[in-house]
Amino acid sequence: MSSDARGTAYGSPYLAGVGIGVVLLVAYGVMGHGVGVSGALTSVVGTAATRLSNAPVLPEWEGYAASGLLGLLGDWFVVEVIGIALGGLLSASLAGRLRRDTERGDQVSVNRRLAFAASGGAIMGIGARLARGCTSGQALTGGSLLSVGSWIFIAAAFAAAYLVAPLVRREWR
Amino acid sequence: MAMIAPVYETGALGGGRALVVALVVGVAFGFFLERSGLGSARKLSAQFRLTDFTVLKVMFTAIVTASLGVFWLSRVGALDLSRVYVPETYLLPQLAGGAIFGAGLVLAGLCPGTACVSAATGRLDGVAVIGGLLVGILAYGAMDPLVDRFATSTSRGTFTLPQLIGVSHGVTVLIVVILALMTFRSAEWLEARRAARA
């Protein structure tokens, strides 16, 4: 069985948008920078890869590899990402939307959905590194700070998404 | 009036307190993402099947709110915009990276931030997206140096829309607001038309 809306109905997208806008303003006003997720994941990968391989860090990991796995907890963006998970957990539990499942289309097996999720994630990881950020660091942060590159990122991401979407339409039927 | 923000940049905030801010900012961000339903891959990806416009509404409202806030706070002298980090522009890498990202987004149904929310609320597909992201990021790091050369090409430094189109900061924000309102109107119209058909 597939899952769709769980628990109570979702809140207004406009109110949530205003909330996220205020979050961005707080980050600018207090920290002088916005939010980000792919950078934090890069810190995790960079630190783990550097630790495990025992080799000199790849140029890609310079500036990302923290002093150690514990040092990651001193990384602003890693702590912020932990917060994102906790905030999602808090909202979902208040709304009765916590449940262990795999969200997928009615005709789609769990394994197929997980394969799409993982491969899509891997492709996004490459794209986010190339673009220097994802939806948080480029679209929301760079977009609201009117960065030209961030608006290029938004336009390219939406264009590609609309081109690919018809090919995978049946995944959610 | 003296500029009071960014607070951290003025040295009035220590590293430990900055991490508390990180946690608070993250919790609020994740909370609002889940509230709007973007922790659901089905709902998020419906944006690209044109059946649900939550992604566009949340994203554009957040951008409008923050860009209006940045404009007015710096206008009244409460925020020193020159000390806020603006992501730098790399034209071709961000065009290509954005396109690759968008293709992956449709397959995954979740972006990196919403995947964290999805995973935290019990969804295994969210966990799989995060696993995929880590693999993709690792693969990128191991790629040919040619990729890195491309990634640093067409660099324009800090390059903003007001500089690009040659109008003031305020006019640019106004254009963004008008575009957002037009987008919201179209989205509501499309959703209403769809609901009437069903």
Image (tube, coloured by chain):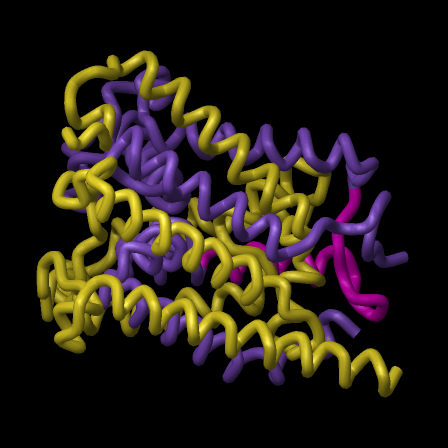
Question: Residue B43: where, in percent of width, then height?
Answer: 69, 62
Question: Does residue B126 sit above or below A143 in this rendering?
Answer: above
- Residue at point 42%, 57% (across, down): B63
For residue B88, side relative to residue B60 (left or right): left
Task: Confirm whether the magenta stretch covers residue A120.
Answer: yes
| Image point (79%, 45%), residue name | A101
Q: Is residue B69 visible?
A: yes
- Percent across and percent down for residue B2 are 15, 29
Above or below, comparing residue B103 to residue B124 in the picture: below
Q: Quadrant of residue B20?
A: top left
From the image, which quarter does the C terminus of chain B lie in? Answer: bottom right
Whole-percent x and y of residue B117? 60, 41
At 39% across and 40% down in the image, what residue appears? A41
- How many numbered badges does the structure rendering display? 0
Horizontal and vertical percent for residue A19? Answer: 53, 44
> Which quadrant does the N terminus of chain B fall into?
top left
Classify residue A31 as left or right of residue A88: left
The answer to which image quadrant residue B81 occupies is top left
Pick the front one: A5 or A1: A5
Magenta segment includes A163: no
Q: Which chain is yellow?
A: B
Q: Is residue B137 visible?
A: no
Q: Residue at x 29, y 72 (%)?
A: A152
Front residue (pair A12, B167) = B167
Write down which chain is painted purple. Answer: A
The magenta segment is A101-122
> Up-down: is A92 above or below A173?
above
